[in-house]
Image: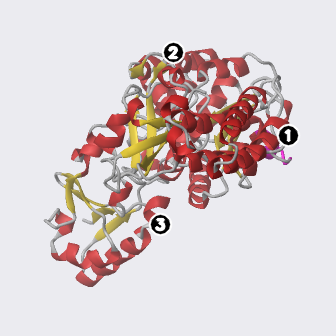
Amino acid sequence: MSIKVYVPRDSSALSLGANQVAMAILVEAARRGASIDIVRNGSRGMFWLETLVEVATLDGRIAYGPVQPQDVHGLFESNFLYGGEHHLRLGLTEDLPFLKNQERLTFARVGITDPVSLVDYVAYDGYRGLKRALGMDGAGVVKQVTDSGLRGRGGAAFPTGIKWNTVLNTGAAQKYIVCNADEGDSGTYSDRMIMEGDPFVLIEGMTIAGIAVGATQGYIYLRSEYPHAYQVLKEAIAVATASNYLGQNILGSGKTFHLEVRRGAGAYVCGEETSLLESLEGKRGIVRFKPPLPAIQGLFGQPTIINNVISLASVPIILDRGGVFYRDYGMGRSRGTLPIQLAGNLKHCGLVEKAFGVTLRELLYDYGGGSASGRPIRAVQVGGPLGSYLPESQFDTPLDYEAFSSIWAVLGHGGIVAFDDTVDMAHMARYAMEFCAIESCGKCTPCRIGSTRGVEVMDKIIKGQDHAANIQLLRDLSDTMLNASLCALGGMTPYPVLSALNHFPQDFGLQKTQQAA
């Protein structure tokens, strides 16, 4: 009987040599006459341990990592196929503290199954949510999503059930489901990990959405920089279609739902839902005025559900276990779990799925292990390049949409980027303005011109030119962008700029007592 050896196919693992490790294991096994079956699973999300190799034993899966091709000979010499001792042996994967203390609901299968094996997916509770949804009417499915308290995981945190209910109750001959997979925020990768590591959960979630509101066509709008996710999604969609989980008469229900993948062209602003719809229609990706809302007039002018990958991938477990089950996780109005992505200057960068309520400090130190440099963590940016910079005094803030809003911050897509005490926050504020200037679609003046002027003002502040006047000008400019921009790109650029100025005034040549001036 062949021994199963798991080697990730996730992009992060591939960049660290996973394909070479898999090949080295195959070659060494053949040389020794060992019978093995290599499974290319998703990543467990512990990037500092990639390539993480797991071996299925009678006691469970034993992890070894980080494995490089030159380590493979020694692993075989140590009898690793039977869980043998080796300096890279980490023990039972499920007992590793980083994983053991998580609440993996959306990521329940990632790293465990073969991403494109429908047999694996069904064996690990896949498509149970869809089967339950097929036995309900649309209003019943929407009620489960509403009862769960699920809010948009892409950043806006809008209640998913309200959006679905609007599309359900808007009459039209054609409706659409669109997945926003244009994951462009710095320090974020949870969408990619789902698409590469468990694509069927996204496909199932979109199918449930279609059945709920009467949509028969879905599109995944995928970031152009995700070639591996593209291939996995295409393969998984083909498998699901061949097995009657997509297409006409799904599982004999009489329901229809077709799904396609469309790739973006690299514009950050196309992560904004109306720009995305413009791009999906083949037009230049620029922001639309609202109203009308996409739920009423979206893709090709038809009612459209547009949700983030994680929002849609959270739906199957909600339908399977019930909305109340999901709602029991979290705090306040932030229900369920959030896949948090740790990045930047941390010892242990990776994915942590936790119920809302965990604090930044717990994430940075209990999971992230502190800074990789060994120096104090001075600031973290949460929510992508347009998120606020938070100082150490705010590290005890729980991850909760309202708690973050109360300190003028956003959770966004759950990305956390850490900086040690060598960071210059004035330069980080300048970068935010420069980023906006480069990525602006150009439709509105506050964003297009404001960000360009912002870079110029920041350069003068950094050089110490007419300091007091330029600080005031920066604040006035930020106020205009915040309140007059057409979308969140221009409207949120002041978040990193003003938070850096307010929390780290000394980097701008100010004393702390001057920060409110």
Q: First in sequence: mark 2 or mark 3? A: 3
Per the image, the residue denoted by label 3 is 15
On the rendered structure, is 380 left or right of 238? left
Q: Secondary structure at mark 2?
A: helix
Viewer-side residue, 235 vs 202 = 202
The answer to whether the residue labelled 2 contacts the one labelled 3, judged by CB atoms less than 8 Å apart, is no
Q: Which residues are magenta?
A: 277-283
Residue at figure coordinates x 66%, y 42% from the top left: 467
Residue 443, label in figure: 1
Q: Quadrant of residue 212?
A: top right
The answer to whether the residue labelled 1 contacts the one labelled 3, judged by CB atoms less than 8 Å apart, is no
Question: Which is in the foreground here, disc 1 or disc 2?
Answer: 1
Per the image, the residue denoted by label 2 is 147
Q: Quadrant of residue 394?
A: top left
**Identity, as a three-letter code, of the amino acid under mark 3:** Ser
Q: Is the C terminus in the top left, top right, bottom left or bottom right quadrant?
A: top right
Q: CA distance from mark 1 to mark 3?
A: 37 Å
Question: Which is in the foreground here, disc 1 or disc 3?
Answer: 1
Label 3 neighbourhood size at 10 Å, few (<14), some (14-19), many (20+)? few
Residue 282 among those drawn in magenta: yes
On the rendered structure, is 437 left or right of 369? right
Residue at figure coordinates x 71%, y 28% from the top left: 479
Residue 389, label in figure: none
**Whole-percent x, y for residue 84 in the image:** 14, 65
Q: Taking 12 as reference, is 382 above or below it?
A: above
**Whole-percent x, y for residue 323 in the image:** 47, 19
Q: Is the N terminus in the top left, top right, bottom left or bottom right quadrant?
A: bottom left
Label 2 neighbourhood size at 10 Å, few (<14), some (14-19), many (20+)? some
Q: First in sequence: mark 1 or mark 2? A: 2
**Identity, as a three-letter code, of the amino acid under mark 1:** Lys
Q: First in sequence: mark 1 or mark 3? A: 3
On the rendered structure, is 263 left or right of 123? right
